[in-house]
Amino acid sequence: MATPRTALVLGGVFDGAGRRGVRTLFGHDGHGTELFGRASECARLDEVITAARLGESRVLVVEGEPGIGKSALLDYLESSASGMRTVRAAGVESEMELAFATLHQLCAPLMEGLEELPAPQRTAVESVFGVRDGTPPERFLVGLAVLSLLSAAAEKAPLLCVIDDAQWMDAASAQVLGFVARRLQAESVALVLGSRRSSQDLFGLPVMALGGLGAEDARALLSSVAHGPVDAEVRDRFVAETRGNPLALLELPRELAEAGIAGGLGLMDAETLPGKIEQSFLDRIERLPRQTRLFLLVAAAEPAGDPALVERAAERLGVTPATVVEDGTDGLLDVGERAIFRHPLVRSAVYRSAGKEERRAVHLALAEVTDARAAPDRRAWHLASAATAPDEAVAAELEQSADRARARGGLSAMAAFLQRSVELTADGSRRTERALAAAEAGLRAGDVDVARRFADLAARDAQDEWQSVRAHLVRGHVTFAAGFNDEAPPMLLAAAQRLESFDMDLARETYLIAWVSASYGAGDQDSLLAISRAMMRLPPPEGSPRALDLLVEGHALLVTEGRKAALPSLRSAADAIARTPPKETTKWIWAAGGSAALLWEDRLMVETHVQAAEEVRAAGAVSEFPVNFHAWGIPALMSGDFTTGSAIVAESEALAASTGVGSTQHTKLLLKALEGDEDEGPRLLTAAIERETANSRLNGIVSANWAAALLYNGLARYDQALRAARATARGANVVLAQWALPEVVEAATRVGDDTTAQGALDDLAAATESCDTDWAQGILARCRALVSRDDDADRAYREAIERLGRTILRPELARAHLLYGEWLRRNRRRAEARPHLRTAHETFVSIGMRAFAERSRRELLATGETVRKRAGTDSAVWQLTAQESQIAMHAAEGLTNPEIAARLFLSPRTVEFHLGKVFAKLGIGSRTQLEDALADSGHAHGRAC
């Protein structure tokens, strides 16, 4: 039999025998010429290749509907990458629940570089690919390892990574590759993905959206596949209805009689185009012999495309594979090194066209021929797909697959295996245990809907109190994870009370989280009081109190007995946390972050949060970054370290986009408020308050109001500042409430509301009672000065400046100088006012607090001094981007490029690239000059994140 000529056209492969005048995928010579009708798209892909060859990384998502030509463009890209190493993978719909399946395809050819990776990264890769057992690696430690692997490969030759059908990547692969894509910068790597639709994991990456062919090209393509003349009016209508989709133009005419094309019969109705294309494949499938259809079904159900596996399974079903291959499949399946369908829509059409019994039989045959040792998870999934009733043996295998997925860090896959295991479990107790495990896995994977559904199932089917209380606990965590709201605290309180009979440590952890959820979210003092009273009724711990015991006691006393009674426990807790191994505090340390703030210990507050963030980073626990980085970002900004604050915002947003977990906006809002942009700041804060109100996230509202109070006090819009500050001070968030009180005092005195100012001062005095720290007493003195007169005010301002000068809180010290200078000028002591106003102005400018800087500038002008208006400092450090600042600060601390890369989840090549830009901007030539260059800008005290 003669081998048919084939031509690759935009939508895929088609039988070109007897067709004349068709331009192939690669133009006329088949080697890198531009695609038919895609000159501009090919040019953009050429730019990607050129950049990678020149040492820059490029990422591009080629996006469009089925049949639009994504795969063909990726083929063109690969053919154009002469001199580059190419690795290619594809998402497979039936492999979406197998963790790291697509990633394994992509990285398998590069594994010779594994030995070059640092040990933690090498271990992470080996764990997720099943080479070794061990603790599940954090998802983005895997991401860093893959980034290093690609970078190492690109050192030898520019690297092209191509991923087709990215919409079908498994969740673990998608998250890792999204993370990697955002960090490729200077590695000579081109990463190009083809996807039908945008996804959260690829959000924000450069996109080349594909539309249909232009009318002229579409008409030419349609005419090329018609065996006879096509009426011009009918042709134009067909082109319009297909919207220029190349696969539709190639495929649909095959299903229409010549008379239909010529006379306009059989044109498309209002069905969606992909569905219509799939239907055309269904029609072709139905005309094939039964044995051929069954062979296609086996191939469709086997995700790896292993021809030997497909053939063995087909033989078990009575199919003779050799006969099927010889007779042909009408171009729908190509069996070579892999069994590859003509288009993904063919696979779905084949699978959909089969009956349930036929699909079950195929999955059973595949399970029987799949090696239980080499591919136990695929075998278990096939067995599950073949099951017609509950089957404990299969459910147990799925549970084991879930354990393996957990060991690889594939939380989404773990949840999927457990969900199917639940469905196949008949025993009530086992079913509930597996439902609880599925709910917990779903919650850890960030799938709140799955977690809620299986927690509800477990609660309904619980066989005993222990199962019931655990189900209740998961439901409380799910509600809390869905957003700070007034539903979570009572649920967590009830769970904690019920847990006391089973696990006192877990009960204490739950009480603490319930307390924080009430303080941060509910805005309901009654709920907070109820939780605190329940905590006070807990029996004393056995032996010496641990950090968790002291935190629970301190938080409870704070509400029931007051701050003075709580402070000793909170101080002891802070000391105990410093002595406790991080692995023992990871579940609740984020909830303890406010203790140092309640103690008014500025250095302890910063050090505690830096340590927590560094522990998270060292462990690669990037899924915990948003909460931990927010906890670090707020103190960093309060100390005037905008370089670190900006870097934390950038890092948090990038990582949140990669993980799909929403990033907290508190640090970003505070940064914008302190920067004092008169145009952008109010718009951003108003939008944030409206958004948080619409979503009933009460802590978000409180946090945005606190930021607004700072912004409006800086802008001297005191009426607005007072409203925002009072709203914050009334909230249940005890930390923000105490921080809002100085804003209330300042704004109220400026609008002449002495009663409100005095009341806020009294509350602040109570909040600082028994806290003889410079932060507490310095803020109290500054506020007391605002409501005092004459010598009392003078002494209070001087005390505030002295005390705040011993803290690391530069903005607070600068504000004390500003307020004192304002007071001196209004009391006609201009000469004395100028040094304080000048100090305030210079400090605000060096930090980047534009609104407060402008306020101090106006006051200086009023004293008769000439001051140049500046938007920011003249220092070259402010020309650095947030990432350049991070790298510069780490390098100044003495870290090597690989060490910086590991901390910032970059490649060493990218660090080297950015350091070169830093040196050029700062006008220096070596690392030894970095510390002085940063010190000259007033940022040497900050720590890089």
Image: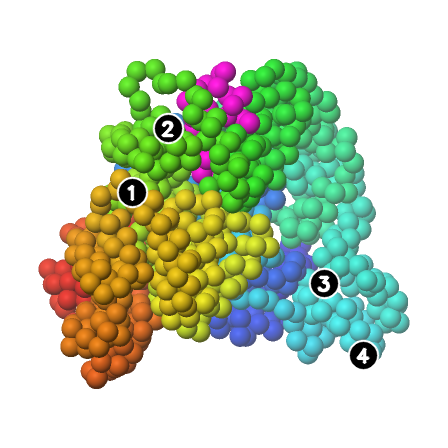
Q: Which mark is residue 769?
A: 1
* Nearest to N terminus: mark 1 or mark 2: 2
The three-letter code of the residue at mark 3 reads: Ala
Which of pointers 4 and 1 indicates the residue nearer the eye?
A: 1
The three-letter code of the residue at mark 1 reads: Glu
Which of pointers 1 and 2 indicates the residue nearer the eye?
A: 1
Name the residue tied to disc 4: 232
Q: CA distance from mark 3 to mark 2?
A: 69 Å
Q: Which residues are magenta?
A: 494-517
Name the residue tied to disc 2: 553
Mark 1 lies on a secondary structure that is loop
Residue 506 among those drawn in magenta: yes
* Nearest to N terminus: mark 4 or mark 2: 4
Name the residue rendered at 45%, 53% in the picture: 728
Mark 2 lies on a secondary structure that is helix
Q: Position of residue 491 (x, y in %)?
A: 57, 32
Q: Residues within 10 Å of mark 4 (few under 14, many from 20)?
A: few
Is 654 above or below relative to 591? below
Q: CA distance from mark 1 to mark 3?
A: 76 Å
Is residue 528 visible in the rendered image? The answer is yes
Front residue of 793 and 520: 793
The three-letter code of the residue at mark 4 reads: Ala
Q: CA distance from mark 4 to mark 1?
A: 89 Å
Q: CA distance from mark 3 to mark 4?
A: 18 Å
Q: CA distance from mark 4 to mark 2?
A: 84 Å
Name the residue tied to disc 3: 248
Report which quarter residue 188 is drawn in. Answer: bottom left
Name the residue rendered at 25%, 82% in the picture: 861
Q: CA distance from mark 1 to mark 2?
A: 19 Å
* Nearest to N terminus: mark 3 or mark 2: 3
Q: Position of residue 702 (x, y in %)?
A: 47, 52
Which of pointers 3 and 2 indicates the residue nearer the eye?
A: 2
